[in-house]
């Protein structure tokens, strides 16, 4: 591609920095294109493979916008984009913005053996958003065609196909702030993903407070990311934020990070990156895969904002990462825990700058039985720890409410509600959600937590909560106990409760990905964990040791507890059903 330069874009901006104070994404790119910054794409060897300056992005996106409109697509039509970390995706996303089309980033398969489940999910997403076109790299076209047989009018294009279309002489008009910019499909950790409606007004409001008040970006900052563009943290945090603040950004693919996590830290070191964000598992994976040879190649002294979010945050993981990489210049004060969700474009709160992560310890028994986050005393039997996720961003509000919707005092656990200019318009094809948002201006996030001195502490998902005999147990607490076994890594355990029947309360199930082959040691692990969980939580637990890669995860890497429970119950039903009945049931389906 002749338009792609092969030298990295500068970290030094040639135009005055603006903090996303634009009416739309189009005007944000129009301004960034006047400067000399842009995007850099790296391969699995950390070699630069493509550079896209914002000036080139604007030119190519406008050309592709006219090409899309020449296909008789109309304003408001959806265009599904297979969200690879590539120049093609970025150009197509912004082409949609210039054309007045609604971009719909969709996930790509992330692992071996996921083809069937991915095809099923892709079919559901296509049925949900009803796109007029799908754009992808050549690699995914056969798969897309195979799931699109029921939609003969759907236009399926590769990036090369799009670039080859004639550029029609069509005038492009600026989008209005209330126009829909894109649909962000949720990760589906508790239900089938739903399309979050994000307008230009909503996303620009979020980009402004993220850049100015949350991360507090500075001229000369350089962003580094491996986060997928189909996730809000990757799309809003590291595609749209750099554009809206005219900063250069360095990308590596999520797959390359998963295979070689140290490439992430090496890229930060190599390019003197200052801002990079990851879920907790990203820090943990890098920690576990680091070698002394890797350490000798690193200098992380430039990294001033190490954001943490997207899943429950373990203070111990962050402590271990900070201790390990302090030797190569990493400052733990760079840690910046945050809270957000796709329904608010991305961010709701950030912890304070340059203060690292702060932990609030509470009496676990009082928390589980009374729903209150009380300071431990000498009589406290066990402690739970939660990480400070900061205060609501300016113009935004957080309330913790009871089941009846009444705001709760500080230190009382309840449902987290959010409000503000970044809030979604509702879910796509869900009139009830759109009406509720418009009427109240508030949204129930589905998360639980408490406030302390105005700071938010997230305790978990409402739907994941394990309730046994009046006691509320957080699944991550049980999972953490499992991860204390030396052979069990963070992310290897998942806990949930089975439905209760009339005879008894539900059973807690703990599934563990176990790499241990010795039957004697496996039995010891089960025995040890059974005793420890009984001692700490006064509950019985059924423990299953599974092969590696057995625990289901959402597209953003979170443990999919609802899916794990579904698989468990399906397997249990099949095990209890006579073979002949299974055959009859299969035939009937």
Image (cartoon, rainbow, N blue to C red):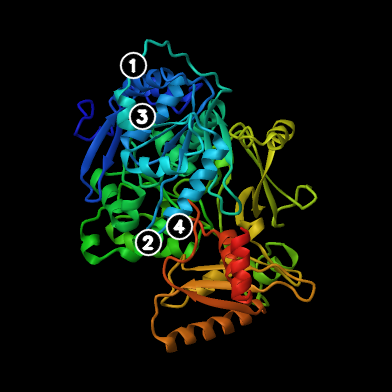
Query: Which mark sits nearer the N-terminus, 3 or 1?
Result: 3
Instruction: Name the element at disc 4.
Output: helix
Q: Residues within 10 Å of mark 3 (few under 14, many from 20)?
A: many
Q: Which mark is residue 285?
A: 2
Between the C-alphas of marks 4 and 1, the distance is 45 Å
Residue 375 located left or right of residue 557: right
For residue 469, side relative to residue 388 (left or right): right
The answer for how far apart the CA atoms under marks 4 and 3 are is 30 Å
Up-down: is 416 above or below 522? above
Which label's residue is closer to the chain start, 4 or 1?
Answer: 1
Q: Which mark is residue 280?
A: 4
**Residue identifier under label 1:** 167
- Which image quadrant: the N terminus? top left
Q: Nearer the viewer, mark 3 or mark 1?
A: 1
Q: Residue at x 60, y 62 (%)?
A: 587
For residue 118, the mark is none
Give the mark nearest the N terminus, 4 or 2.
Answer: 4
Q: Earlier in the sequence, mark 4 or mark 3?
A: 3
Image quadrant where residue 490 sits = bottom left
Res 91 label: 3
């Amino acid at each position: 591609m002749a338009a792609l330069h092969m030298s990295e874009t500068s970290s030094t901006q040639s135009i005055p920095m603006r903090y996303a104070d634009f009416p739309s994404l189009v005007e944000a790119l129009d301004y960034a294109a006047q400067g000399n910054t842009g995007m850099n794409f790296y391969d699995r060897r950390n070699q630069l493979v493509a550079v896209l300056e914002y000036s080139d992005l604007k030119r190519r996106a406008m050309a592709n916008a006219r090409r899309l409109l020449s296909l008789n697509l109309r304003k408001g039509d959806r265009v599904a984009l297979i969200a690879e970390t590539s120049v093609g995706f970025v150009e197509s996303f912004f082409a949609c913005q210039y054309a007045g089309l609604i971009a719909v980033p969709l996930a790509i398969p992330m692992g071996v053996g996921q083809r069937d489940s991915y095809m099923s999910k892709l079919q559901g997403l296509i049925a949900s958003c009803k796109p007029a076109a799908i754009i992808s790299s050549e690699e995914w076209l056969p798969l897309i065609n195979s799931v699109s047989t029921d939609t003969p009018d759907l236009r399926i294009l590769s990036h090369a196909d799009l670039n080859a279309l004639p550029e029609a002489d069509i005038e492009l008009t600026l989008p209005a702030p209330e126009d829909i910019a894109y649909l962000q499909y949720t990760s589906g950790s508790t239900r089938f993903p739903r399309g979050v409606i994000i307008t230009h007004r909503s996303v620009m409001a979020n980009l402004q407070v993220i850049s100015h008040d949350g991360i507090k970006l500075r001229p000369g900052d350089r962003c580094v990311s491996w986060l997928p563009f189909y996730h809000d943290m990757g799309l809003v945090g590291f595609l749209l934020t750099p554009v809206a603040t005219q900063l250069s950004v360095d990308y590596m693919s999520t797959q390359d990070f998963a295979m070689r996590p140290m490439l992430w830290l090496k890229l930060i070191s190599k390019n003197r990156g200052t801002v990079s964000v990851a879920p907790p598992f990203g820090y943990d994976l890098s920690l576990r895969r680091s070698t002394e040879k890797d350490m000798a190649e690193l200098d992380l002294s430039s990294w001033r904002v190490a954001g943490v979010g997207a899943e429950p945050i373990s203070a111990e993981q962050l402590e271990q990462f900070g201790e390990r990489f302090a030797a190569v210049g990493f400052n733990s004060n760079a840690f910046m825990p945050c809270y957000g969700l796709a329904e608010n474009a991305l961010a709701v709160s950030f912890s304070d700058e340059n203060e690292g992560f702060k932990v609030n310890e509470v009496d676990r028994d009082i928390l589980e039985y009374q729903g209150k986050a009380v300071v431990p005393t000498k009589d406290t039997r066990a402690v739970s720890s939660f990480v400070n996720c900061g205060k609501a961003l300016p113009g935004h509000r957080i309330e913790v409410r009871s089941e009846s919707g009444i705001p709760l005092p500080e230190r009382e656990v309840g449902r987290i509600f959010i409000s503000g200019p970044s809030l979604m318009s509702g879910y796509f094809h869900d009139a009830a959600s759109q009406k509720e948002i418009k009427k109240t201006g508030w949204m129930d996030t589905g998360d639980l937590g408490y406030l302390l001195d105005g700071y938010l502490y997230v305790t978990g998902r409402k739907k994941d909560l394990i309730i046994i005999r009046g006691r509320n147990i957080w699944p991550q607490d049980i999972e953490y106990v499992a991860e204390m076994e030396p052979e069990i890594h963070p992310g290897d355990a998942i806990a949930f409760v089975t439905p209760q029947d009339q005879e008894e309360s539900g059973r807690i199930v703990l599934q563990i990905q176990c790499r241990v082959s010795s039957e004697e040691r496996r039995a010891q692990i089960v025995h040890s964990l059974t005793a420890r969980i009984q001692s700490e939580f006064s509950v019985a637990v059924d423990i299953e040791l599974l092969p590696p890669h057995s625990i289901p995860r959402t597209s953003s890497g979170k443990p999919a507890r609802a899916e794990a429970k579904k698989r468990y119950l399906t397997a249990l039903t099949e095990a209890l059903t006579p073979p002949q009945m299974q055959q009859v049931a299969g035939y009937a389906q």
